[in-house]
Amino acid sequence: MLNLLEKRSIDYVPIAERHGKVWHLWPIWFSGDAHLATIAVGVLGIGLGGNLLWTAIAVITGCALGTFFMAFHSTQGPQLGLPQLIQSRPQFGYMGALLVWVVAMIAYIGYNAFNEVLVAQTVRQLSGAQHGIDAPVIIVFTLLAAAIAAVGYDWIHRTQRWIAYAMIAVLLLYSIAVGVVMRLPAHHWDLHDFRTIPFLVQFFAAAAYQLSWSIYVSDYSRYLPREVSVSESFWWTYLGAFVGGVWMMLLGTVAAALNPQAEVAAAVTALLGLVTISSLNFYGASLTLLSVADSLRPGSASTAKRLISLGMATAASIAIALLASKDFVNRFGDLLAVLLYLFTPWTAINLIDFYVVRKGHYSIREIFNPHGMYGRWNWRGLLSYGVGFVVMIPFFSTGLYRGAVASALGGADLAMLVGLPVAALLYWALCRNLDLQSELRQVRLADAGLDPHMPAI
């Protein structure tokens, strides 16, 4: 059994240990989207009065935009051999990166508590039971997801492939059946019946949902061979996430159009997808918790530490789910929107640094050096993050708070469209005076002998 467990956690994956095929990325992200929460995203436009045609267009174009940024993170894995969030240290500093990691921990554990409550509600609806089954369902579901996360990277990939094939078969049958029986009023197909607010709300909800995967992505590409190209890892990730996201959201859109009063969660039983996405959340939570611990007290990575951090994340999510109020799903949905706002400037800064500023040249050893070349606190990244977040506030639209611009637009949330370019452009401008040639020489010296198979830069 111990031989099945992944040996690495937040540490560098040497080139000699790289394995897998780049096409394995599409099942990870197809299955990642193949669950109930994704379906619920596709309901928003119809619920606000949009017709099926324009809501479907909003879903497709929104997913196309959000997945574009998300998929670029996937290419970082083969290049650096590191999990996603540990790569934040060059942009924010050794300690500064804690800001993003704490937000990520809340998101990971909260998402899973949300999933656990959703599964319990769905099982109760499907079984007709009224009381007494929520706690056992939550515990069994959570332990199953945690077990997959405990085994680690390779088995997560295998499980996601099995789920992807099964979900494709089920979704094909379901989609064909819906297409045969679907009878909708003519206005649902009217190209001239465009309504701005429902379209914008649906578009940015789909885009933001896809972008929310950014904190995970290179966790599941970091073992791939280093020679995997940027285009290969980008397109295989994009294919899986885009198709999975669009397909599942459109099921929600169609279900809402057919019967706006229906509880979609009771009609569509994509529970296996929730198990695997919860595994991804637990795996990411364990790596993030280890990153936090490493910042506070540097030490060597180990399987035992990864399992301990996983156990802590699992216990926290079960406790939240069991103590959740009846309104937890709605209230936590508002909190998740705020958390997504917090990740928007991060993804912009991380991508602009990797592709434009440093062009993928980082020192692995210095990323783990608390007094290294990237500093304890990187004012450029932190300032860009703060400004990027603040300029989004007037555009916020949640149950907790609605900004002035969002109110003027009838609740449409354009925050992502503002936060991404502002944070990226400001960070790029602040990095113009960096001596990158000197930094590149430091990288070469610091990583000399790190990996005999690593090509020179």
Image (cartoon, rainbow, N blue to C red):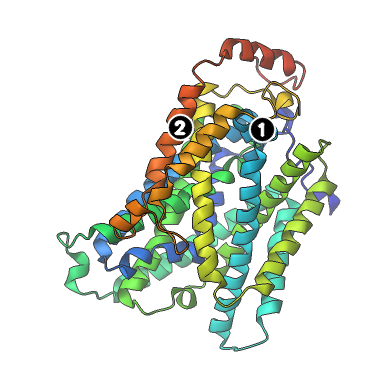
Residue drawn where x is 42% and y is 69% of the image: 173
Amino acid under label 1? Gly
Mark 2 is on which residue type?
Ala
Residue at 54 percent across and 28 percent down: it is: 354
Image-based side of 437 in relation to 264, left or right:
right
**Which badge, 2 or 1, is on the more N-terminal residue?**
1
Residue 233 in the image: x percent, y percent?
A: 52, 36
Which label was assigned to residue 81? 1
Q: Is residue 89 above or below residue 219?
A: above
User: If the image is split into quadrants, where does the C terminus sit?
Assistant: top right
Mark 2 Cα-neighbour bin, 10 Å: few <14, some 14–19, many ≥20: many
Q: In which quarter of the image is residue 164?
A: bottom right
In the image, residue 209 lies at what x, y percent?
46, 53
Q: Which of 274 and 292 is in front in this view?
A: 292
Q: Where is residue 424 in the image (x, y as percent from the top left)?
A: 46, 32
Mark 1 nearby-residue class (10 Å; few <14, some 14–19, many ≥20): many
Residue highlighted by disc 2: 424
